[in-house]
């Protein structure tokens, strides 16, 4: 088990910023990622990071969102800038592993552990 706890969601106007945080207890050899799910839509990958620091982003958020990890690797962040109404969704932190040093993916089906989510609402 890898307990994951997200925080930092909220409501902002279009063009605003939010920073999501996720605390992952336990494993240092797991890979982490951020996902989101809007009502009536499938869960989609937003950003992910490998154990070596390689990152990958969904095309819809490139240049606006930044994923990063804390020094101890057990905290994951998602800095979201220039938010748009279409970014409105429940955001989830997820973990998979143990994973190889350079492995990174946005496929939600390969992630084993999920947080409960934090809501992000962007108004126009």
Image (cartoon, rainbow, N blue to C red):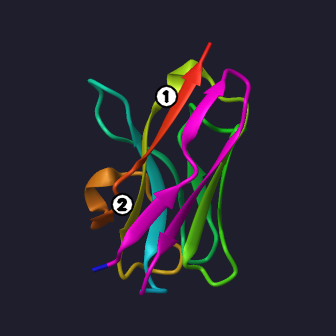
Q: Is residue 115 left or right of residue 51?
A: left
Which residue bears the numbered disc 1? 88
Q: Nearer the viewer, residue 38 or 46?
A: 38
Q: Is residue 104 visible?
A: no
The image quadrant where one finds the C terminus is: top right
Q: Nearer the viewer, residue 21 or 106?
A: 21
Choose the circle earlier in sequence order: 1 or 2. Answer: 1
Which residue bears the numbered disc 2? 115
Q: Nearer the viewer, residue 67 or 83?
A: 83
Q: Is residue 122 above or below residue 63?
A: above
Q: Which residues are magenta?
A: 2-26
Q: Residues within 10 Å of mark 1 (few under 14, many from 20)?
A: many
Indicate yes or no whether the magenta region holds residue 25.
Answer: yes
Q: Is residue 64 left or right of residue 44?
A: right
Q: Position of residue 94 (x, y in %)?
A: 39, 61
Q: Position of residue 108 (x, y in %)?
A: 32, 52
Q: Helix or strand or loop: what does disc 2 sit on?
A: loop
Q: Is residue 11 left or right of residue 1?
A: right
Residue located at (58% from left, 72% from top): 75
Residue located at (51% from left, 36% from top): 120
- Overall secondary structure of the magenta section: strand
Q: Is residue 1 above or below residue 31?
A: below
How many angstroms separate mark 1 from mark 2 (CA)?
18 Å
Q: Is residue 15 above or below residue 7?
A: above
Residue located at (42% from left, 86% from top): 27
Q: Is residue 13 visible?
A: yes
């Amino acid at each position: 088990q890898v307990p994951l706890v997200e925080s930092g969601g909220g409501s902002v106007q279009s063009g605003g910023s939010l920073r999501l945080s996720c605390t992952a207890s336990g494993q240092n050899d797991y890979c982490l990622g951020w996902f989101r799910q809007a009502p009536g839509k499938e869960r989609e990958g937003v950003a992910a990071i490998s154990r070596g620091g390689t990152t990958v982003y969904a095309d819809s958020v490139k240049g606006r969102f930044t994923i990063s990890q804390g020094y101890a690797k057990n905290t994951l962040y998602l800095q979201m800038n220039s938010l748009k109404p279409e970014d409105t969704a429940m955001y989830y932190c997820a973990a998979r592993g143990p994973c190889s040093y350079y492995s990174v993916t946005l496929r939600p089906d390969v992630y084993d552990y999920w947080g409960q989510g934090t809501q992000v609402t962007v108004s126009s």
